[in-house]
Image (cartoon, rainbow, N blue to C red):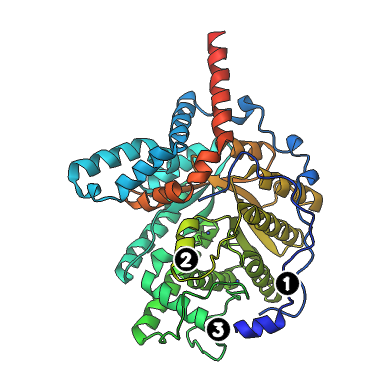
């Protein structure tokens, strides 16, 4: 299939005509941290540039009194303290080392560390320890004009028993959301790694990659889906022909499909869309396979199931075009959550260990360019009623460009197919600025016990140190508002 694609694709299929991006990213850093091709060029996508966006009149981040209206001073103080601590790299490095060390096997040490994490980073970045608590947090958040993306922090199930337990928690999350007013929860977040055994996902990914290399390699269990690879997709994870799935593995794969189908049906009953997170490239082909199959089944008339595209991957633009084009042929509305990515260091280490080129863009500016081009592409799909997008980003520049592009295309702020999102506990001033500009804005809200969410917190610390330390805007605006309140109280 790889050779077939190479013959059919133009020499540079997604080098969109564009003006150069003339500015570097703003002081806010990048988000986090969830796809057959015809012989023609991708549609010309006009590159978003700062000159297109009179952003100061669209997304106002200067009036802190208006930005933080309704946020208690105590919460601002805690947020300021935690965000400043998270920006101190030695503190983060030390905490990460302790949590990954054998010290966590010592009872008193473990208790002390988890206690410290619970009252600081956990309370700042997580919505609670259970579905009911998380739903209560969403309710409070909704009073500030923001919505919640509920993420039960479950991942990497080892067997069917673990998958069934995780499935029960996902269904409980959906059921708990019934108690909230309509539209308070924008999405239920799910990870395929939680409802399909992780080793099976690796096996399926290997088989899909080999079929990309050798189109004569048949997969009898494969359902209707979109293309999952482009000519630039990394295939080095699978150096030799894998064995076909045995009967037990095929049975387990069917069970995983049934779990996803049940979850989709439960979300349908409560009218809450489902968004499936992306993961690392070793298992992402299988995740895309599950996600795209669900999109084909459930997005016939409107976007209900969303996949996640990671713009830090070099093949992201190509895969997004391929998937969207195939969706249009099938009469399916493509739903995408656009992120930058959260596995940068581990992906580079793996590629280096195998003597391969990293699948991650070589520079941060290339990632920014890819994100903005994908954003422009999806906004044009919204304008033609063939797509929907969630811009999950902490990058102010990208948001301003997307807002200007949406306005130029006549995509109204209240369009249900357009949403912005940031991580819970981070970039709150940015979220409030987008809200005040009239956009739908959600916060990605993981919940679970401290032990459950530890992988999430470690990823935020280890993979996104640059984001935490470089994201000065939120800290500056929080300090500014606290100072304003102090002066108001004194005077």
**Secondary structure beneath disc 2?**
helix
Residue 459, horizontal then vertical, whole percent? 43, 51
- Which of the marked residues, 2 or 1, is nearer the chain's N terminus? 1
Task: Characterize the local packing of mark 3: few (<14), some (14-19) or many (20 or more) Cα atoms within 10 angstroms.
Answer: some
In-front residue for pair 149/427: 427
What distance separates the C-alpha of mark 2 from that of mark 1?
A: 27 Å
| Gap in angstroms between the C-alphas marked 3 and 2 | 22 Å
Toward the left, the furthest residue is 107
Question: How far apart in space, not on screen, are marks 3 and 1 (Cα)?
Answer: 19 Å
Residue 262 can be seen in this image: no
Residue, far bottom:
216
Position above or below: 467 against 44: above
What percent of the width, then of the height, locates residue 372?
A: 69, 54
Which residue extends farthest top?
A: 491
Q: Which mark is residue 223?
A: none
Circle 1 packing at 10 Å, graded few (<14), some (14-19), many (20+), is some
Q: Is residue 257 above or below residue 89?
A: below
**Mark 3 / mark 1, whichever is N-terminal:** 1
Query: Could you tell whether 418 is left or right of 284 in the image?
Result: right
The residue that label 2 is drawn on is 352
Which residue, given by chain and number where applicable, does mark 1 sit on? 13
- Of marks 3 and 2, which one's residue comes earlier in the chain? 3
Q: Nearer the viewer, mark 2 or mark 1?
A: 2
Tag 3–tag 2 contact (CB < 8 Å): no
x, y percentage for residue 162? 31, 65
Say how many tags the image has.
3
At 50% from the left and 51% from the top, the residue drawn is 33
Task: Give the image quarter of residue 213.
Answer: bottom right
Q: Secondary structure at mark 1?
A: loop
The residue indicated by pointer 3 is 213
Left or right relative to 471: residue 384: right
């Amino acid at each position: 299939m790889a050779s077939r694609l190479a013959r059919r694709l133009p020499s540079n299929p997604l080098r969109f005509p564009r003006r150069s991006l003339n500015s570097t990213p703003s002081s806010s850093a990048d988000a986090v941290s969830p796809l057959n091709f015809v012989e023609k060029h991708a549609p010309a996508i006009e590159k978003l540039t700062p000159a297109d966006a009179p952003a100061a009149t669209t997304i106002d981040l200067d009036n802190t009194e208006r930005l933080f209206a309704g946020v208690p001073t105590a919460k601002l103080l805690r947020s300021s303290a935690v965000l400043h601590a998270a920006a101190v790299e030695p503190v983060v490095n030390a905490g990460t080392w302790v949590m990954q060390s054998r010290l966590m096997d010592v009872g008193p040490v473990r208790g002390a560390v988890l206690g410290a994490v619970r009252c600081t980073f956990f309370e700042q970045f997580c919505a609670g320890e259970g579905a009911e608590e998380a739903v209560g947090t969403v309710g409070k958040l909704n009073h500030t004009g923001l919505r919640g993306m509920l993420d039960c922090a479950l991942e990497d199930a080892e067997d069917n028993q673990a998958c069934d337990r995780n499935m029960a928690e996902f269904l409980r999350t959906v059921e708990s959301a019934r108690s909230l007013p309509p539209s308070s929860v924008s999405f239920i977040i799910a990870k395929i790694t939680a409802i399909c055994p992780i080793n099976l996902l690796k096996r399926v990914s290997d088989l899909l990659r080999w079929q990309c290399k050798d189109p004569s390699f048949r997969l009898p269990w494969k359902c209707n889906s979109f293309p999952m690879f482009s000519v630039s997709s990394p295939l080095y994870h699978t150096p030799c022909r894998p064995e076909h799935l045995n009967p037990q593995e095929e049975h387990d794969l069917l069970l995983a499909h049934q779990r996803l189908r049940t979850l989709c049906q439960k979300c349908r009953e409560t009218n809450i869309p489902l968004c499936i997170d992306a993961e690392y490239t070793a298992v992402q082909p299988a995740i895309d396979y599950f996600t795209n199959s669900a999109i084909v089944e459930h997005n016939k008339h409107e976007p209900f199931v969303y996949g996640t595209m990671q713009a830090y991957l070099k093949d992201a633009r190509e895969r997004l075009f391929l998937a969207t084009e195939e969706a249009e042929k099938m009469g399916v509305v493509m739903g995408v959550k656009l992120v930058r990515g959260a596995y940068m260091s581990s992906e580079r280490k793996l590629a280096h260990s195998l003597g391969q080129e990293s699948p991650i863009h070589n520079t941060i500016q290339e990632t920014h360019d890819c994100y903005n081009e994908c954003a422009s592409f999806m906004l044009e799909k919204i304008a033609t009623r063939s797509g929907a997008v969630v811009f999950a980003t902490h990058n102010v520049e990208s948001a301003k460009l997307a807002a200007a592009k949406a306005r130029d295309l006549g995509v109204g702020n209240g369009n249900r197919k357009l949403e912005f999102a940031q991580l819970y506990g981070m970039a709150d001033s940015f979220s409030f600025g987008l809200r005040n500009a009239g956009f739908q804005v959600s916060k990605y809200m993981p919940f679970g016990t401290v032990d459950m969410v530890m992988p999430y917190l470690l990823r935020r610390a280890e993979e996104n140190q640059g984001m935490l330390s470089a994201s000065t805007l939120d800290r500056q605006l929080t300090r500014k508002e606290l100072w304003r309140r102090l002066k108001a109280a004194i005077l």
